Amino acid sequence: MKTIFLFCFPILLVLPQNLRAQVKDIPNSQDHPAVSRFAGSVIKFYDQKNFDAYALRLGPIERGKETAAKKQQLEGVVTRIIYQSPKTNSVLEVFRNYEQALVQGGFEQLYKCELDACGNGFSGSYPSGNMGHVRGFTDQQRYLAMQRSDDNGTQYVAVFFVMTHDGPVTRLDVVEMKPMKTGQVTVSAAQLKTDFEKTGKAVIQQVYFESGKAVLKPESKPALDEVAKFLKEKSDLNIYVVGHTDSDGGFDFNQQLSQQRAQAVVDDLTQQHGIAANRLIAKGVSYLCPIADNGTDAGKAKNRRVELVRQ
């Protein structure tokens, strides 16, 4: 992976090795190998997930209308880093350095906004756990969303800058598009039977669709095979196949999407597994029944699911 270094004309901004030890980053944190920090900055928050969902912001965000903002849904390795820069630096200085370094590193701009053009809800659209005390700051706000494809695949970088009482804060998110490692959690016909005996329904998290579409991904096959096995063992059971979505895109869009996804599961069970069509009814409920907070990417990932409910 090509590493991007930040420059301040004409001084190199990457910290010398003998000074790095003096930087008081939080424990178990590090710069992302794709892009360095601005000189003198300290890591205040760090999180990396081997596979997670991420909503890439591609338009202005107004307070109270975060779910209606233009976003692109990504999945892959997600790294989040928040840097605190010295008070002697301006947001514009940090912003311009990142912008130039990313362009020189082969990234192409997807969206950029500065100051009021970002909207008054941009900072608040970030998870509150990521340095929540700076979540409401909008002073001098600027944002970049960029993309690069190379031999390592496609990488997305989203960088949000804002001024706080302690100086500029940079929120750096890097998403490396990689397929999810499957087979780590499996659905079993035996577990489905137990769930129905206890509650009259079963939640299936391992049915996956292409982003924003009702097209089943190949990695859904193991779960659907077990669902079919369960239905063949319980030949007297009729079920609703219920589609659930997150809240991105608005209610009407998600109502249609959830219905189409539920129908896609019904079609797979009837056409690929021989389950009688009169035993299955597809229903979509949009985001009316969340099981997690739609205000976070992790919560949204949990809410995108299929449930089997006894008729």
Image (spheres, rainbow, N blue to C red):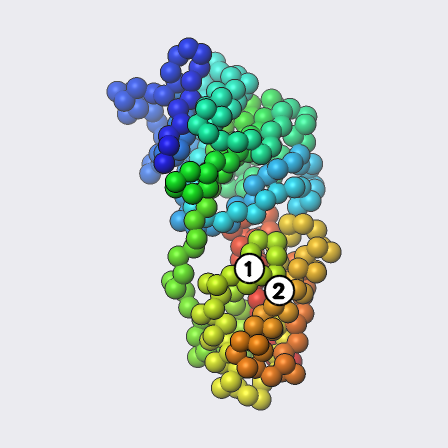
Q: Residue furthest right?
A: 252
User: From where the camera sits, is residue 187 visible?
Assistant: yes
Using the image as rendered, state which of residue 267 and residue 252 is in the foreground. Answer: 267
How many numbered badges does the structure rendering display? 2
Residue drawn 46% across the image and 29% down it: 106
Q: Is residue 42 visible?
A: no
Above-or-below relation of 208 to 161: below
Local packing at callout 1 (Cα closer than 10 Å; few below 14, some 14-19, many 20+) is: some
Give the x, y percent position of residue 210.
56, 56
Residue 299 versus residue 285: which sits nearer the camera?
Answer: 285
Name which residue type carries label 2.
Arg
Kindly state the secondary structure of the residue where label 1 is placed: loop
Q: Report the front residue among 134 and 121.
A: 121
The CA distance from mark 2 to mark 1 is 8 Å
Label located before the other in sequence (2 or 1)? 1
Up the image or down, 93 lies above or below 187; here it is above
The residue that disc 1 covers is: 209
Residue 231 against residue 4 in the figure, above or below? below
The extreme left residue here reads 18
Against 242, residue 74 (above or below) is above
Q: Amino acid at mark 1?
A: Phe
> In the image shown, does 123 or 229 lie closer to the viewer?
229
Q: Which residue is tagged 2? A: 261
Query: Looking at the rendered structure, which numbered label has been put on residue 30?
Result: none
Quadrant in which the C terminus appears:
bottom right
Image quadrant containing the N terminus: top left
Which residue shows up at 43% across the image and 55% down it? Answer: 180
Q: Are marks 2 and 1 in contact (CB under 8 Å)?
A: yes
Near mark 2 (Cα within 10 A), the count class, few <14, some 14-19 or many ≥20, is many
